[in-house]
């Protein structure tokens, strides 16, 4: 491994730890030339997961695209980014474990909807309005009524 400080090509590993539930390794290294320490990460390389869109097109799964959608749904909500990243981690763990090469966008969207419904009802409705492509106010009201019926009377925060 090339030292990022002096570019010398030899080092020794001074510490190794598994992270992300065993799917990665964090290594602390020390350069044998300059003595400075640096950190490297090793991840399992997986074949790219393909998302099959509603119209049949296929595109490579993008964690950033999913996280961006969640951030938009949770805009001005009291939900830290770290919590959304954890939510994406949970979805990815379930998805990568269950599906080999492809997942339908509808399945991925349903997983997001389930997680958001538990997390925040306002974010859930925002995401649903885009994901389910509401055409008019009646579809929106139907989703709100369904959410209210499930939660008992009034929602989880407001």
Image (cartoon, rainbow, N blue to C red):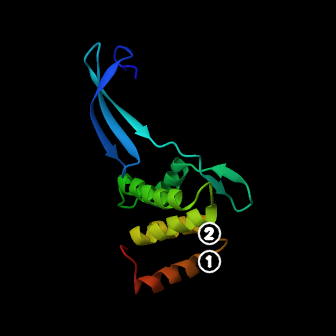
Q: Give percent across and percent down for residue 102.
A: 63, 57
Q: Quadrant of residue 119?
A: bottom left
Q: Give percent across and percent down for residue 83.
A: 37, 57
Q: Give percent across and percent down for residue 57.
A: 73, 54
Position of residue 71 relative to residue 139, above or below, is above
Mark toward the viewer: 1 or 2? 2
Residue at the location (34% across, 17% down)? 5
Residue 126 visible in image: no
From the viewer's perspective, is 36 left or right of 4?
left
Q: Which mark is residue 47?
A: none
* Residue position marked by numbered label 2 in the rendering: 132
What count of labels does the image hold?
A: 2
In the image shown, does 132 or 139 lie closer to the viewer?
132
From the viewer's perspective, is 18 left or right of 106?
left
In the image shown, does 98 or 144 lie closer to the viewer?
98
Give the crowd class for mark 1: few <14, some 14-19, many >=20 residues within 10 Å. Answer: some
Residue at the location (59% across, 66% down)? 107
Q: Give percent across and percent down for residue 130.
A: 59, 64
Asked whether the residues under the numbered discs 1 and 2 touch, taking CB atoms below 8 Å apart as contact, a structural biologist would say yes
Residue 73 visible in image: yes
Location of the N terminus by quadrant is top left
Q: Which mark is residue 139?
A: 1
Residue at the location (26% across, 20% down)? 36
Cα–Cα gap, marks 1 and 2: 9 Å
């Amino acid at each position: 491994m090339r030292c990022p400080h002096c570019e010398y090509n030899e080092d020794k590993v001074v510490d190794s730890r598994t992270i992300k539930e065993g799917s990665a390794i964090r290594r602390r290294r020390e350069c044998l030339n300059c003595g400075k320490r640096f950190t490297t990460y090793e991840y399992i390389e997986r074949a790219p997961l393909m998302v099959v869109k509603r119209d049949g097109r296929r595109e490579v799964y993008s964690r950033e695209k999913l996280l961006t959608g969640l951030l938009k749904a949770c805009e001005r909500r009291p939900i830290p980014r770290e919590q959304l990243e954890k939510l994406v981690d949970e979805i990815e763990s379930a998805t990568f474990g269950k599906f080999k090469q492809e997942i339908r966008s509808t399945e991925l969207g349903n997983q997001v909807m389930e997680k958001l419904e538990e997390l925040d009802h306002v974010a859930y409705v925002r995401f649903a309005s885009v994901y389910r492509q509401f055409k008019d106010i009646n579809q929106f009201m139907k989703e709100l009524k369904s959410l209210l019926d499930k939660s008992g009377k009034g929602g989880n925060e407001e």
